Structure formats: structure tokens, C-alpha cells
Amino acid sequence: MLVHEEYRRQGIAKALIKTCLDHLHSRKIRCIKLDATPTGKLVYSQLGFRDEWSFHRWQREGDHQHDDNMVVGPESDTGWNLDLDKSAFGVARGQWLNRLANHSRVIRYREGCGMVREGYLASYVGPVIASSPETARHVLDNLLASTNRTTFWDIPHPNRDAIALAHDYGFQPVRTLTRMWTGQELAPCDLDLQYAISDPGTG
């Protein structure tokens, strides 16, 4: 959600979020989540959202503005591990992963999967799920080798193994955001399996 700076503090953000919430409530959605900037967090808190966990955006500078050599789309027939993904994220999201894969380079193994995609300002790593730090490193080795651009990587703060990997790859934290939720019940997730989340702009 973005509001042009000339029109902020007029209630537009609240109206937009309330419209979204009304739609989701009408569909009987029990848990609604979003990723909040420090500025947006105040608005969401006033609408009943609560903190779940924080994450940092990590960044590594690249050599090129665009990477014409990145191959997008599925590279393997093994398939994304949907069972592992559901354990990591808390809900089934196969359809969304398929849509995201159409615009991403995808690495798929039995014990871990990951994507990297071209954005306007940089390449974005995520989502990345893995059953161990060793598998995560193997996935990330392949993903990061596919782009020479500046790269963003959003890491849940509780996943200390992912943070250690980011340091090893030469990334630096540049921004803090908060995963927030509202609804009848919190859909639990396993952050130890989430080595990167997809950037908030993908939904």
C-alpha cells in the first residue's frame, strides 16, 4: 500500500486497508497478515494488527544494473516441496508459488527450494525454504550465482542461521520491517525453515 506524499495524513491509508479487510472478512479469512514499515506499523496497529515477528532487508551491491543472463521459470522436474513449504509458512500456497515462479529463477531440491527474480531496483532472493542450513547454503549458492545485480534478501529475524549465511555472502542489513497479523486465530509458521521470504511487493 502506497499513498502519494502530497495526500498523506488524510485517512486514505486507513480507508484502503479497511476496504481490504472488509473483503477478506466477507470471505471468512481467519488470519490476515501483512509486512509493515515503521511508518505503516502505526496505521495497522490502530486497525487491530499485532506484531508477529520482525525481519531485516539485507543488501549486497552488484556490478550491473540489469542481468540479461538470468533464466526465469522452472529449471527442474522435481517440483517445489509443498509439504515443506506448508510447514514453513503455515498454509498451503501452491498457486501463489506457481505464479511467482513464472517470473523467477527457481532452484528445487527435495530438502529445500528457492527463487530469485529481477526487480526494478535490484534482484530479490526469496522465498527460500530449507530443512537445514547446509541445504539452504546449497540453494543460495545457486541463486546468488545467477545474478550480478544489487540483491535484496528479506530474512526473518528469529532465523539466526539465515542471518549467519547473509554475513557469509557479504550482505548488510539496511531496513527493518514487521510481520503483523489480525483475525480470529494466528496461523503458525516455522521460521527455522524460512531462510528468505519473498519481498513484500509480491504479496
Image (spheres, helix red, strand yellow):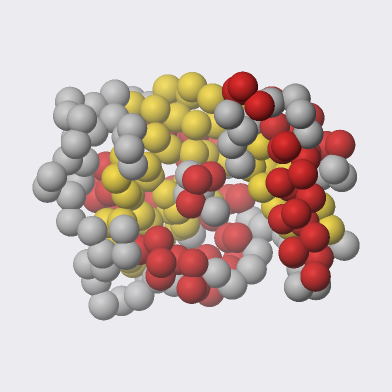
Residue visible at 39% across and 35% down in the picture:
152
Left or right placement of residue 90 versus residue 175 in this view = right
**Image quadrant occupied by the N terminus:** top right
Rendered position, 111 above or below 124? below
Res. 189 image quadrant: bottom right
Q: Quadrant of residue 22?
A: bottom right
Q: Position of residue 177 (x, y in %)?
A: 62, 32
Seen at 77% across and 44% down, the residue is 15
Q: Position of residue 36 (x, y in %)?
A: 66, 37
Residue found at x 59% / y 72%: 92
Image position, residue 169 (x, y; %):
32, 31
**Residue drawn 23% across the image and 58% down it:** 72
Q: Is residue 3 left or right of residue 194?
A: right
Q: Is residue 95 left or right of residue 91?
A: left
Is residue 129 placed above or below 199 in the rendered structure?
below
Residue 102 in view of the camera? yes
Q: How many marks?
A: 0
Q: Where residue 48 appears, x then y in whole percent? A: 87, 45
As drawn, the residue found furthest toward the left would be: 69
Q: Is residue 37 above or below residue 1?
A: above
Asked if residue 157 can be seen in this view, the reply is no
Looking at the image, which is closer to me, 8 or 55? 8
